[in-house]
Amino acid sequence: MNKKLLWTTAALLATAVGIPPSYAESTSTIEPSAVNESATPISTPKATSPVKVGEYQSPTRQSNSVVARIQPHQQAGRQAATIYVKNIPVLTFLDSDVVSSANTKPQTKVATSTNQADLSKADTASEANSAVRRATKVAAKINQLHLNGVDASKITAKWKANAAPDQGDRYAIDLNKEELVEINSLTRLPDQTKDLSEDALQATNRLRRLLGNAPPLQEVADKPAPKQVAAPQANASKQTKQNARAVLSGIASWYGPGFHGNRSASGERFNQNAMTAAHRSLPFGTKVRVTNKRNGRSVIVRINDRGPFTGGRIIDLSAAAARVLGVLNSGTAPVQVEVLGR
């Protein structure tokens, strides 16, 4: 009787505290999934990629916001760096000192915020003024302008007055009257023309077209008029004859992908991204200015190959030169070719 009363009392107590009598002595197991569902999720920080200059961290960031890239290389025994905008060479920067051939292997660089931060770590003036660092600064500006939707028609070229006599002629590429880059003996057009004024004009026109398809400029602002030097009378007829042969007109075509890397007639390997061209008779190394008569765009190229051999065509441009002139889609265009010499 007492045992029966004891068990009845225990059952009533278990029911009161909410424990089923049959499981009062068992240990319940909590499934891991139940813990995960009930616990507050822990957010894991996502890895962030370096922010390129001219970009901001945003889910709507466009992949084409970086248009300017840097290619370090050596030129005439000096460290150099060339800025490519949409794969077109626009500016080449040179170190002031000759460097040894045992240098860092060239590699394409993007102007990023990391590059920009490194610029402040330069310990000496020579480091801060190196070709790569100067190119990085300008490339960063170009990328920012592109991101901001720059009005390319505001990009202009001008002669810099009051330049130091020992530094020679200097020119500047400006945007809204603020200097973007100075063109001088250490900052030139990649396919330089031996004329700083022409280098400045060509580089400016490439930026105008690549950043906004603005029409080309015809001259550098504020440039002083050249001094007139009377030629000897004995050479007058010879000079006139030379000038008569210096301008040619005809149809230009272009070639590229199928020939890239092959040996050209001059012996050098054809590079479709260089400003070169083929001509049937002009000496190798001759530089010519080619102007597209349809749109007024012009480019200076170096003759390093023979051709074209199709009737009616007078010059065969590299793919890069054709892109500058706006000939890629049409394939051919009527042009004027001015022989500038070597």
Image (spheres, helix red, strand yellow):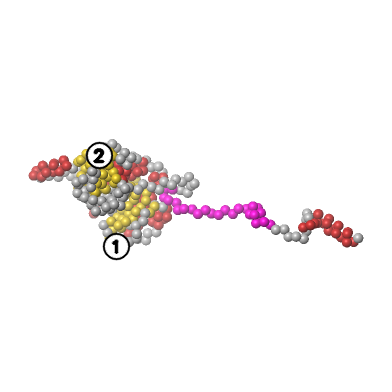
Q: In which quarter of the image is residue 104?
A: bottom left
What segment carries the magenta color?
30-55
Going by the numbered disc 1, the residue's amino acid type is: Ser
- Residue 143 lies in magenta, yes or no? no
Pick whichever, 2 or 224, lies toward us: 2
- Residue 33 lies in magenta, yes or no? yes
Mark 1 residue element: loop
C-alpha distance separating marks 2 and 1: 44 Å
Residue at 19% x, 41% y: name it: 247
Residue at 17% x, 42% y: name it: 245
Q: Mark 2 points at which residue?
A: 251
Residue at 27% x, 45% y: name it: 317
Secondary structure mainly formed by the magenta segment: loop
For the question of whether residue 125 can be seen, the reply is no
Q: Quadrant of residue 330?
A: top left
Q: How crowded is mark 1: few (under 14 residues within 10 Å), some or many (20 or more)?
A: few
